[in-house]
Image (spheres, rainbow, N blue to C red):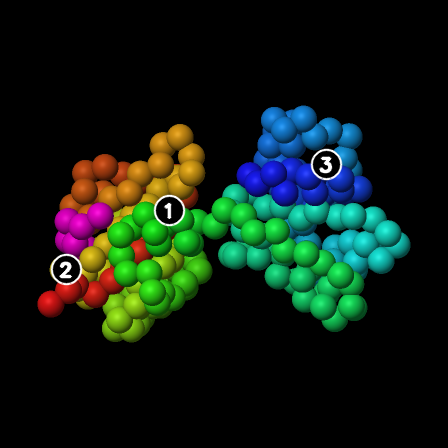
Amino acid sequence: MTLRALEILRAADRIACEDTRHSAPLLSHYGISGKPLVALHDHNEARKAPELIAAARAGELIAVITDAGMPGISDPGYRLVQACIETGTPFEVLPGPSAVVTALIGSGFPCHAFRFGGFLSVKSGKRRTALSAALGSGETGIFFESPHRILSTLQILAEIDPAARTCVARELTKKFETYHRGTAAEVLEYFQAHPAKGEIVLLVHAAED
């Protein structure tokens, strides 16, 4: 949490949250209370955006936060920003934590060029295609993955290239943050013996010659 973000949250007339139940303890931790909280998530963002735009144009300062990471990056926020641009409503982006760049640096993989693929598909065929494309790109591939699917995804990765450089970054910036690095075969073997929990970022890079 940056000092600038706290300043805006304290000044805001209302705060749009991905999940008010998650945001309320965060705000309480920083002594921010008495602010109207509005739910803004994937299922209502398109409907809520006009309401928030109207409030902003009437003079309200509205802050937008998500449960973890940067709003708009596989999180709500994209549609609201689009609406601001379309209506000429001023908005400001406050840089903050992002699992994408945190995992990239922590992996130790090349950082000069990378591709972020968002959440991998629930369909194994599409996961295979995405992982193959990342390995063939020469860049570091970054994906979000569910703990319920990471084992099957690692199995697919090991089938494509067992020597592929692989990193599973878990629970970034939290108490139980971990990085597991190795070949696809090695990382698969580890998680076969130790079932994964928590939020996961998967990074892949073709094996070095």
State if disc 1 and disc 2 touch (CB < 8 Å).
no
In which quarter of the view is residue 32 placed?
A: top right
Three-letter residue code for mark 2: Pro
The quadrant of the picture occupied by the C terminus is bottom left
Q: Residue at x 52, y 57 (%)?
A: 73
Residue range of the region highlighted in magenta in the rendering: 181-186
Give the class, few, some or many, for how many residues have Cα within 10 Å of label 1's Cα (few <14, many ≥20). many
Q: Which mark is residue 10?
A: 3
- Give left or right: position of 184 versus 54: left
Q: Is residue 162 visible?
A: yes
| SS at badge 2 | loop
Nearer-N-terminus badge (2/1): 2
Nearer-N-terminus badge (2/3): 3
Q: Quick one: 196 or 53, which is closer to the camera?
A: 53
The quadrant of the picture occupied by the N terminus is top right
Residue 106 is one of the magenta-drawn residues = no
In which quarter of the view is residue 9 placed?
A: top right
Residue designated by label 2 = 162
- Give left or right: position of 54 versus 172: right
Q: Position of residue 139 (x, y in %)?
A: 30, 68
Give the class, few, some or many, for how many residues have Cα within 10 Å of label 3's Cα (few <14, many ≥20). some
Residue designated by label 1 = 200
